[in-house]
Amino acid sequence: MRLNWRKQQGAWGSRAELDEESHQYAKRLAYSVLDNGIFIGGDEQRSHRLYRYAEKHYARAMR
């Protein structure tokens, strides 16, 4: 069953092409978050910009 599904999907490209595409996707997502100011939280008083939240809680990972 699984082998048949893989055959139906066809070739997705080389490993390097897939890595580059995933990198570009993550890059576009990060720039859109920075440009658009996506907010998280329950209401206007308690919402935080997603970037500021990540900067505070995941500073080590963002370096």
Image: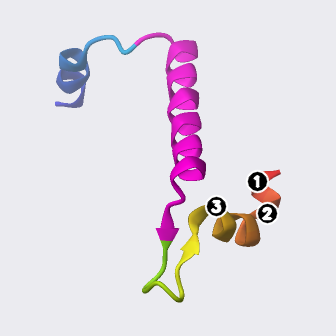
Residue at (52% x, 45% y) in the render = 32
Helix, strand or loop status at disc 2: helix
Left or right: 59, with 5 as reference point:
right
The 10 Å Cα crowd at callout 2, few under 14, some 14 to 19, many 20 or more, is few
- The answer to the question of whether label 1 and label 2 lie on touching residues, with beta carbons closer than 8 A, is yes
Name the residue nearer the viewer: 21 or 46. Answer: 46
Tell me which label, 1 or 3, sits earlier in the chain: 3
Indicate which disc, 3 or 2, sits on the residue closer to the N terminus.
3
Q: Which residue is mark 2?
A: 59
User: At label 1, which amino acid type do we have?
Assistant: Met
Q: Is residue 31 above or below residue 1?
A: below
Quadrant where the image shows the N terminus: top left
- For disc 3, the marked residue is 51
Number of marks in the rendered image: 3
Q: Is residue 55 left or right of residue 8?
A: right
Q: Is residue 10 left or right of residue 27?
A: left
Tag 3: amino acid: Tyr
Observer-nearest of 17 and 40: 40
The magenta stretch is 13-39
Q: Is residue 21 magenta?
A: yes
The rendered magenta stretch, by its main secondary structure, is classed as: helix
Provide the residue designation for mark 1. Answer: 62
Residue at horizontal 47%, vertical 84%? Answer: 44
**In the rendered view, would you say 43 is above or below 2?**
below
